Amino acid sequence: MRGEHPGRAAQPIIKVTDLAWLEFAKPDLDRAETFAHDFGFTTAARSDDALHLRGALPGTHCLVIRRGPLSRFLGPAFQAADAADLDRLARATGHRVRPLTEYGGGLSVDLLDPSGLPVRVVHGVTEQPAQPLQRPLTVNAGPAAARVNATQRPPRKAAQVERLGHLVLSTRVFRRALDWYLEHLGLIVSDFLYLDGQRDRGPTMAFIRCDRGNDPADHHTLAMHLGPDTGYVHSAYQVADLDALAAGGEYLRERGYRRSWGIGRHIQGSQIFDYWRDPDRFMLEHFTDGDLFDNTLEPGWAAMSASGLAQWGPPATRDFLGTRPSPGLLRQALAALREDNEIDRARLLGLMKALNS
């Protein structure tokens, strides 16, 4: 509608091309590596203090897990198009370009977003060659018979992670954080969600993609929503097809891991999804068949609701939505109401209604 958020900055400082990797701290690297292999990553490098994990497609590693006393999310790294972009970003923000001295090397500019989350923008990191890929199954669909005199027997094994797809964050300062990512990193919005009856107050969630011009990008590389907590919600990793995702889910279940929600197909982004908890309770998603947009599409707008998260599949769980009653959830809500942020009573009630609708 006239006057609503345009979903992009008129003159962003730079335009990142993708997520490079995510960083976590965990006290037990052996346990983290075991889950990573069961989920479908391979180890790119390991030391006493850090574990670098990769997908099968060529590119940088996609996860860094550092040894630390507590399990926590340390922040994302985005890929700059060239070294000149790092210089431009450093000058505009008053930071400096510094060398990365650990596995992969390269250069980095380290920033803080309005939520206080460390954000790294990198270039020149060593890229790994492709590994042999898990082949999608040949499917007989409609009148076309592509498979004759042959059966389907997908192996029950770890679904091979091909690449890092996207990161989802929660923030109490949604509008400020959204504008920061659009202005500093040149990201553009694919879809906005708003609270029912509160569209005039603006969106409370955004699915945000990289602006690669005519070159299509994932429907969202970053998604953010307004909430009483701040930080990591989940991250998503591409696999070959539905059979790889489903058989990989059975493999995870048999090894004692807990599904958070799935299997289903999303509305915004269209991905087939399956969500799991790792041993440190971080949520990770296997996905396949996601939408790709170039930079010509304008943002879509829809009301936020739990039932509006999927075209088909089981109802979204309380674990996935983060609405399981707990003292911690109540403390977060009360703290958010006391602070100077974008959470007020009407917004909080609207979020509760959306997540239970």
Image (cartoon, grey):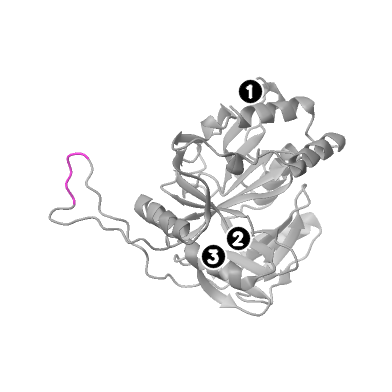
Given the image, on which type of amino acid does mark 3 rest?
Answer: Phe
Q: Earlier in the sequence, mark 2 or mark 1?
A: 1
The C terminus, quarter of image: top right
| Left or right side of 337 for 59 | left
**Distance of mark 2 from mark 3, alpha carbons?**
8 Å
Bounds of the magenta segment: 142-146
Q: Label 1: which residue?
A: 196
Which residue is drawn at the image coordinates 58% and 43% (left, top)? 320
Q: Residues within 10 Å of mark 3 (few under 14, many from 20)?
A: some
- Locate residue 305, reporting x and y percent: 58, 29
Question: What amino acid is at disc 2?
Answer: Pro
Which residue matches tag 2?
279
Tell me the mark number nearer the camera, choosing from 3 and 1. Answer: 3
Q: Is residue 350 left or right of residue 141?
A: right
Q: Is residue 124 visible?
A: no
Q: Which residue occupies the foreground of this view, 60 or 94? A: 60
CB under 8 Å between callouts 2 and 3? yes
Residue sitting at the far left: 149
Q: Earlier in the sequence, mark 3 or mark 1?
A: 3
Identified at 37% across, 65% down, the residue is 133
Residue 146 disc label: none
Q: Residues within 10 Å of mark 2 (few under 14, many from 20)?
A: some
Residue 205: % across, % down = 64, 36
Residue 334 rendering spot, x and y as whole percentages? 82, 36
Ranked by sequence position, the earlier of labels 2 and 3 is: 3
Mark 2 vs mark 1, foreground winner is 2
- Residue under the image location 59 percent in, 69 percent down: 31
Q: Residue furthest top?
A: 197
Residue annotated with mark 3: 35
